[in-house]
Amino acid sequence: MLRSTFSRSEKIALWALAVTAFALRIPLAFRPVHQLTLLPYGDDAYYLFSIARNLANGLGPTVDGHHLTNGFQPLFTFLYVPLFCLSANEQWLAVRLSFILAGLVAAASVWMTAFVLRSLVKPESTQNSMSIPIIGALLWTFSFQIFAQTTNGLETGLYSFLLLTVIALYSQFQTAGGSKSSRAIWLGVVLGVTVLTRIDAAILVTILFIAETIKRRKKQALTFTAVAFLISLPWWIYNAIYFGNLMPTSGQAENIWPIPPSENFRRAIQAVTDIFLLIFYAPDSLDLSFRIVLVVVCAAVLIIVIRDRRFRASIRNRVHFSYLLPFFLFGIVLVVYYTLFFRAPHFIARYLQPLRIVWLLAVATSLPTIYRILLDRWKKLVPTLAVIVLISVIAFDGSRYTKNYLKANDAEFYDIGKFASSHPNDKIGMLQSGIASFVSPNVINLDGKVNTDALHAHQQGRLASYLHNENFVYIADLKPFIEDIATTAHRNELFFDSVGMIGRIQIMKLHDASPRLRN
């Protein structure tokens, strides 16, 4: 299905960029054990590692080895299982090997970005011009945003690769006029695998079905939708039978916390700003008002560029931009859904990865035209500025890579795991329990992401009874989070007192329970 012709020089460049993308991930695997729990991996990545470890040990999809969970994205978690099989009892070796897997996916994504852009660019416009596939591959390799989102230990890297593959297949499907049923079948296969990689890709399947139905290709639309559904069906059946809900517990758990809508809007604006800037960096501390101004300025510049007649004519003659429209709509739907109807502001940047991909492809296809227009006006200045910007971005991102990843050293969630391992007979509850429970099995999830009992306790307002009945001796987490849990328990006459801090993590020990709870 995927056939694209690259020149010899393009192939050399793509191999070089793919090797670079792979190589950037490998040094992270050689850090000391405690640093493996720091960025770019987060706490949620270690839920996947725990589940994969238990699958490798024949215990099923569980974090604690006892209770089934569906609070994870299935396909990428299953890809971790062979790493734990190969590592036997050396669980940290499996974590190190995961960076090799991330590097391979990143290298494949470099090539797939080039395939997509070759599919989007009209054949007659590829002569005597800058190589758009190489521009896209460069952006993919050196964008710190792309690096951070696709090397987080979660499914986003594989999800990105599969989304790129879907765009490439869909572009070729459009070029061929959807005439061959085999193309629809292949598109359905990749869509089904994409849904298993990240469940909200089911929205994309629906959008593509509607788009092709509108184009009067209902048979092909039904074909790829049916194939995608059949491939993802085992996961839906598992959710329905064991959990009675198609939404994973991780999604349900995010929605039980009273997070103000303003926080969702703030994080959404931050994510959209970063997507607009692509290879540049806006600090997290940047004031919201400045971010809004930045978005408005970027949008104004974009409008000015689009209004240029030469730009529009060049893009119309060179690029099949219409092929990207369903994917752009998918990104907008995600922005609306995760901002207005979902309570996980800290994950919005990751959830909007499809929009980031579409924007990168749009920028890559537009840059040669913009460069030529600017070059006509400022012949001597533009090439120099382009080189300065490229060197500055690589240098700045390189310093962030070193500071945030290679030199970071504050592993407090790992340390709380070591604390738990020194109290092996005491059950310890944490909201953010991924890293700590990977280190020590007596750490139990409290926010409900991977613990259905805790989720139901939250939903039914009986958290104190759950903590008491399950014999939790300690609760611990970031100070404001765990104090909320202690306050809830206190209102129900279950008393936890602070006994110390590990970094920002407060540890609280059970002091007393009311006779009502004890009985």
Image (cartoon, rainbow, N blue to C red):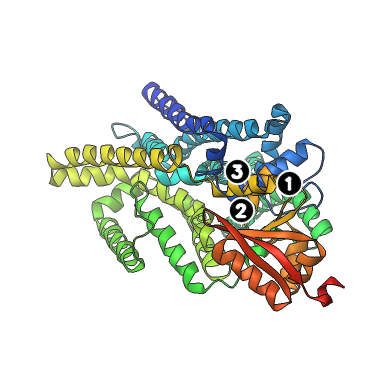
Residue 192 in sight here: no
User: CA–CA distance between discs 1 and 2?
Assistant: 33 Å
Q: Which residue is mark 1?
A: 441
> Who is closer to the viewer here, 506 or 211?
506
Residue topped by disc 2: 201
**Which tag, 1 or 2, sits closer to the chain's start?**
2
What residue is drawn where x is 24% and y is 51%?
310
- Please, what secondary structure does the residue beneath circle 2 have? helix
Location of mark 3 (residue)? 179
6 displayed left or right of 509: left
**Residue 446 is drawn in which quadrant?**
bottom right
Whether residue 136 sits left or right of residue 203 in the image: it is left
Q: Tell me: residue 110, above or below residue 301.
A: above
- Are there few (<14), some (14-19), or many (20+) residues within 10 Å of tag 2? many
**Mark 3 vs mark 1: which is more N-terminal?**
3
Residue at 72% x, 67% y: name it: 511
Q: Are marks 3 and 1 in contact (CB under 8 Å)?
A: no
* Tag 1–tag 2 contact (CB < 8 Å): no
Q: Amino acid at mark 2?
A: Ala
